């Protein structure tokens, strides 16, 4: 069974087409919409204890200007962490999130899975970076 269905791939293609990779990109909205294809509640921030079902959060870890030409950066690199919170192990969901983000232009570079015994919550983390084209922006 494929990680992503044909419908999910079609949805992803539409999302990517509607968010051109340039300085006008609303990266927060883009990430939320890409991950939202899973059908799981997604929001920017950290674990939301008021949500009792599986949910996904993401936050920006850092960013930096890169690819300089004539003292002006042509790109910006953003590092994000995506976290899946659930009462059950969501191995396939993490694979789906990774696949969606990678197909949307993100690069996966690290992850960590843990079970938090005190809360009974599985916490699956995945870290990515994304390069945004800002050529011509000062």
Image: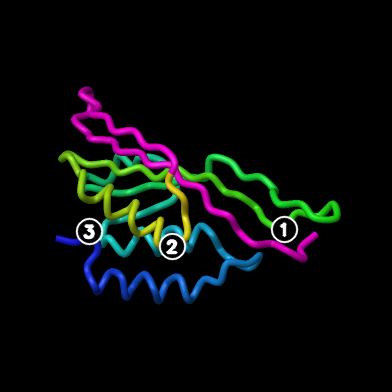
Residue 18 x, y percent position in the rendering: 49, 76
- Packing grade of label 3 (10 A; few <14, some 14-19, many >=20) is some
Q: Residue furthest right?
A: 70
Residue 84 place in picture, x, y as percent: 30, 44
- Residue 33 horizontal side relative to residue 27, left or right: left
Secondary structure under tag 1 reads strand
In the displayed structure, 39 sits above or below 58; it is below
Tell me the CA gap for discs 1 and 2.
20 Å
Front one among 105 and 37: 105
Would you place residue 78 above or below residue 89 in this image? below
**Could you tell me which secondary element the residue under label 2 belongs to?**
loop
The residue pinned by badge 1 equals: 74
Q: Quadrant of residue 36?
A: bottom left
Q: Which residue is mark 3?
A: 3
> Magenta part of the protein: which range?
109-138
Q: In whole angstroms, how far apart are the C-alphas of marks 1 and 3? A: 34 Å
In-image side of 64 versus 8 (left or right): right
Residue at (38%, 47%) from the top-left corner? 57
Residue drawn at 53 percent across, 53 percent down: 130
Task: Tell which of 96 and 30 is nearer to you.
Answer: 96
Quarter the C terminus occupies: bottom right
Q: Is residue 53 magenta?
A: no
The residue beneath circle 2 is 104
Using the image, determine if residue 104 lies above or below residue 18.
above
């Amino acid at each position: 069974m494929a990680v992503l269905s044909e419908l999910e791939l079609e949805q992803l293609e539409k999302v990517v087409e509607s968010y051109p990779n340039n300085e006008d990109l609303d990266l927060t909205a883009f990430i939320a919409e890409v991950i939202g294809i899973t059908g799981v509640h997604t929001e920017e921030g950290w674990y939301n204890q008021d949500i009792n079902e599986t949910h996904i959060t993401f936050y920006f870890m850092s960013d930096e200007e890169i690819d300089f030409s004539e003292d002006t950066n042509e790109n910006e690199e953003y590092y994000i962490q995506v976290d899946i919170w659930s009462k059950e192990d969501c191995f396939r969901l993490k694979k789906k999130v990774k696949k969606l983000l990678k197909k949307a232009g993100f690069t996966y570079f690290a992850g960590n899975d843990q079970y938090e015994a005190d809360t009974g919550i599985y916490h699956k983390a995945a870290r990515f970076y994304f390069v945004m084209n800002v050529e011509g922006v000062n």
